[in-house]
Image (cartoon, helix red, strand yellow):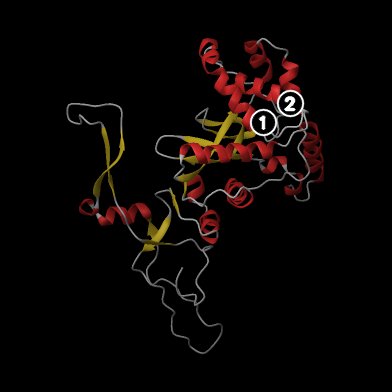
Amino acid sequence: MTPEEMEEVRPRLEAFAAEMLGPLARRDQRAKGELYLRGLMLDGKRKSMQPMAERLGVDHQQLQQFVSSSTWDYSMVRERLARWAAAHISPEAYAIDDVGFPKDGYDSPGVARMYCGALGKRGNCQIGVSVNMVSDRASSAVDWRLFLPESWDDAKQGEDLLLAEAIRRRRTKAGVPDTARHREKWRLALDMLDEVRGEWELPDLPVVADAGYGDATGFREGLTERGLTYAVAVKATTTAHPGDATPERPPYSGQGRPPVSAYPQPHTTLRALALAAGQPATRTVTWRQGSRATRRNPTAEMRSQFLALRVRPANRSIRRSADALTA
């Protein structure tokens, strides 16, 4: 956003900031919060304190103090933002996502060499996991967590006492609280869904996520335990049995431990099951209105072929039913 564009929307932005930051007790905190929000929205690739302050024409210490050392309850602001989003965009789902922030330094909390989407490869970065309220026309991140890799958790280093001590020094220098520990991204997502739906009392909505979350059996089971419907991506190499496959219990010989039920045929991949269904099983669906009309597609409809198959996941860690016959 250019400075000229900012001047046009500034009254609306100030009103929005006043609503979101209203719970903050001190007037200077509310003012610096609005200033920080303006800095984020102005044009410029770097969103760190000094470049933002230069674009705003203020001392960067004002922004630094607000973010780093000012005592204000960010969770209350997040809750207000989430309620505002729920009222304004009429969300239809919760979208789970994560984003990488490239970092050159070593001391930023959670920084490590990981895959970074912004770089398109592995690199030095931080990763933030978010819960987003989404509809066909809008989306808003309403809760987020910083992912801490195992390399930032001294409790995960086993008997390597020297490494654990080095990590503790690094955590102290970066201001990482002792309660912040390594948790898988999908666990962070479930934690946030509990906060959004439980503590903030926002509505139960379907959950969507990419294969980074959909391939985690614990994530899918966690959604089921919470009574949430979901549509998540999985990799083509994910293993499964056909939907009509039924586990069978072999006859018991009377000696040793009774055999457990098992599928009579070995599992295969989702890709193989889809190919076996063949082209006749697919259906062409218009799934979105695009923006590029062509002679063959004057209405810019975005169409794809879809295939719906019922399958039984073959992951050993999936909990079985009480009779142990079905997964």
Image disc number at residue 21: 1
Q: Are marks 1 and 2 in contact (CB under 8 Å)?
A: yes
Q: SS class of the residue under badge 2?
A: helix
Q: Is residue 34 visible?
A: yes
Q: Tell me which label, 1 or 2, sits earlier in the chain.
A: 1
Relative to 112, say whether 183 is above or below. below
Local crowd size for mark 1, using a 10 Å CA cut-off: few (<14), some (14–19), many (≥20): many
The outermost residue toward the left is 295
- In percent of width and height, residue 64 lies at 73, 22
* Point 67% across, 40% down: residue: 148
The disc labelled 1 sits on which kind of residue?
Answer: Leu
Task: Report which residue position mark 2 lands on.
Answer: 29
Relative to 250, say whether 3 is above or below. above
- In percent of width and height, residue 312 lies at 40, 63
Q: SS class of the residue under badge 1?
A: loop
In the displayed structure, does residue 171 sit left or right of residue 322? right
Query: 284 or 251, which is in the foreground?
Result: 284
Relative to 327, say whether 268 is above or below. above
Image disc number at residue 299: none
Residue 168 occupies quadrant: top right
The outermost residue toward the bottom is 254
Query: 266 or 239, which is in the foreground?
Result: 239
- In percent of width and height, residue 37 lies at 62, 23
* Point 38% across, 72% down: residue: 246
Residue 45 occupies quadrant: top right
The disc labelled 2 sits on which kind of residue?
Answer: Gln
CA–CA distance between discs 1 and 2? 8 Å
